[in-house]
Image: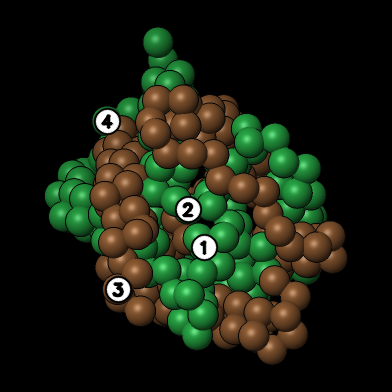
Chain colours: A brown, B green
Amino acid sequence: MLAHLSQFNITEALFGGALIGVSAVILLLFAGRIAGACGIAFSLINPAVSNQGWRLMFIVGTVLGGFLAHQMTEVPVPNAPTSNLLLLILGGFLTGFGSKLGNGCTSGHGICGIARLSPRSIISTLTFMLAGFVFVIVLRHGLGVI
Amino acid sequence: MNSAQKVSLTSLIVGLMFGAGLAISGMTDVTKVQNFLDPLGNWDITLAFVMIGALAVALPCFHFVLKKSKPKYDDKFHMPSATKVDKKLLIGAMLFGAGWAMVGICPGPAFASLSYGYWQTLVFIAAMFVGAHVSRKLLD
């Protein structure tokens, strides 16, 4: 299976990953904040959270950054999600519900949390990766729905 | 510029880099994500290099940044206070992983791929906010 490796885009993955890493370091160094997409986004719909300006700017930046990346590089715009409506709704719901319950997602736990060697984040990342494997295997090879 | 404005401007620039990084790395490509999560199929491990690239930068830098007494534009670092590995963390991570698998989108890439103009992304984001809202209501 590793023979497939060359057809994929390791350089882009490493470069894009480094960019994500640099962005997290800048936010920590200047604002003292963790660059976790779900924590930032979900605070925006929580009336108990004050100081929303920087959070809104982060999300606006993320949307624009995703747009500009394809204008400024050769990386093609990916295809639309192929999951059916039920999976889109259920997948979105569980992604939001789970990351709120577990205090973080791929960026918050997977990058920032591991970078500060938080045991919670390391265990969270291993758990959601494992759950991801199990669910793709069940949904694709078991049920054939994705 | 006051410090709140400086934080907001920093955050906009950080968001731009974050969104671009997600798009360039392949994290907004749902097929790639689902193939990454599929060791029994046409396993594409490229996305592991996203984490390697990010941590190669963030691990050493966080170590030095967190030695400082405070960030540049604020009085203190806003670090998560929870330290215990509890049921909420584990169940949350499991459900999050399940949702990620179903569509191939996690929260950051959901926003970074908004400009692609797919209605599926909008449905996913709306459902994601509902899920987060319900979760918070249950926690309160």
Instruction: Note whether B2 is above or below A124 in the view shown.
Output: above
- Give the residue at mark 3: A3
> Of the residues under marks 1 and 2, which one precedes in the sequence?
2
Amino acid at the residue labelled 1: Val
- Give the residue at mark 4: B72
Amino acid at the residue labelled 3: Ala
> Of the residues under marks 4 and 2, which one precedes in the sequence?
2
- Give the residue at mark 2: B27
* Labels 2 & 3 near each other (Cβ < 8 A): no
| Quarter residue B4 falls in | top left
Seen from the viewer's position, the closer of residues B137 and A145 is: A145
Amino acid at the residue labelled 4: Lys
Chain letter for the residue marked with disc 2 in the picture: B
The answer as to whether the residues below labels 1 and 2 share one chain is yes
Q: Residue reaching furthest right?
A: A86
Q: Residue at x 68, y 54 (%)?
A: A81
Chain letter for the residue marked with disc 3 in the picture: A
Seen from the viewer's position, the closer of residues A140 and B52 is: A140
